[in-house]
Structure formats: C-alpha cells, structure tokens
Amino acid sequence: MQVNTKHDTWNFTRDMFIFCAFTGITCIDLRNLKHSNIQRQEEDSLWIVLNRQKTGTASYIPLLDIPIQILNRYRDSEFAGEDGRVFKLQTHVNMNWQLKRLAKATGIDKRLTFHMSRFTFATTVCLTQGVPIETLSQMMGHLSIKTTQIYAEVTRTKINEDMTNLAQRIEGKYELTR
C-alpha cells in the first residue's frame, strides 16, 4: 500500500498493517508488544518472542528487514510506546477505521482489517514462499497445526483460481506440435 499523506496517523497505521503482514502478529499482540519481546537470537538476528494474548501460546517470529525498518522508524517518534511498549497504538476499532480510510484514499475497494495482515503473513509471505506449515504454525502461535492448515487451504484455493485465470488468458495462444 503506497500512499503519500500529510497525515502522520495514516502513515503509522499503514506501517503497523505492514508490520503485522510481515510478522503475523495480531493487533492486540502488537498493542501489547514490549521491547523485552524483541530479542537477539542466534547469529545476532532479531526475533519477537511472546505469548499470544488469545491463547497464551508461545510465538517465536524471526524479524525480516521490513519490520526492523518499521521498528527503527518509530523508535523515537510520537508513536513510540510507553511503559515498555514498542508502539503507542489506538484501539483496534480505531486502527481498522484508519485502515478503511487509507484503503479508500488509495483506491483499494476491498474491506481491509488488521486480521487480513495476519492472513497475508501466513499465505503470501510464508506459505507461497515455501515456508513449511510446521514453522508457520510455531510463528503464529497456533495451538494446533489444524488451525494453520486453514491458511494452506486458502493458498491452494488461490493457486487454483490463479491457474484458472491463466488458462483462460492463454487459451488458443499455444499449441503442441505434432
């Protein structure tokens, strides 16, 4: 989502959506994210290590470059959190409302919610890029791999839809030689 705006809140909301899309954490876990949850692990990589609020299960997420850039962007800003929190977030409802306004401003007709960023992480960022479902399940803090398999079904559905569209676009353009 690319939008240049004078509204710092819109930019922050966009970046929080992107942060969630590259980490898979929920809006409530983002809101509760503390500096102590961001830890250096093996080979000096940064990870988010937390227990999900919804289930209490552990979630271990290695940070890709984009979330690290977002962490650095807001470290000393007006959106830096208090009481050890990383970010100063509005309510979940308000964040989704801001996201809706952003979508409209950028011409996105789809109804965006922060939960969609978690779905994006699972499907677009991880599964379609070859991350094993067992690894994804651990990162998302799912109690059961069956929960994670729901995302895999969506991916197969999307693949089938894309291939059907491709077949229609190339129909009659190629033929097998005799």
Image (tube, rainbow, N blue to C red):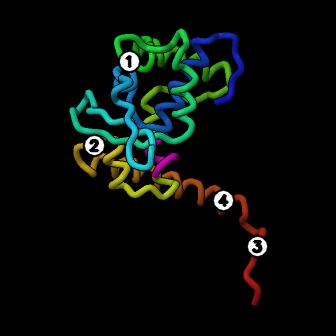
Which circle marks residue 85 in the picture? 1
Q: Amino acid at mark 3?
A: Tyr
C-alpha gap between disc 3 and disc 4 = 12 Å
| Residue 46 image point, x, y percent | 44, 39
Q: Which residue is mark 2?
A: 142
Q: Amino acid at mark 4?
A: Leu
Which of the two marks, 3 or 1, is nearer to us in this view?
A: 1
Magenta stretch contains residue 122: yes
Which of the two marks, 2 or 3, is nearer to us in this view?
A: 2
Q: Amino acid at mark 1?
A: Arg
Q: Residue at x 34, y 27 (%)?
A: 36
C-alpha gap between disc 2 and disc 3 = 45 Å
Which circle marks residue 17 in the picture? none
Front in this rendered view, residue 153 or 8: 8
Q: Is residue 143 above or below residue 103?
A: below
| Residue 82 image point, x, y percent | 39, 11
Q: Residue at x 38, y 24 (%)?
A: 35
At label 4, counting other C-alpha atoms closer than 10 Å, the crowd grade (few under 14, some 14-19, many 20 or more) is few
Q: Earlier in the sequence, mark 4 or mark 2?
A: 2
Q: Which residue is mark 3?
A: 174
Front in this rendered view, residue 16 or 113: 16
Q: Pointers 1 and 2 in contact (CB under 8 A)?
A: no
Q: Which residues are magenta?
A: 120-126
Secondary structure category for the residue under label 1: loop
| Residue 56 image point, x, y percent | 21, 32
Q: Is residue 13 left or right of residue 122?
A: right
Q: Which residue is mark 4?
A: 166
C-alpha gap between disc 4 and disc 2 = 34 Å
| Residue 5 image point, x, y percent | 69, 15
The answer to whether residue 111 of the structure is visible from this angle is no
Which of the two marks, 4 or 2, is nearer to us in this view?
A: 2
The image quadrant that residue 7 belongs to is: top right
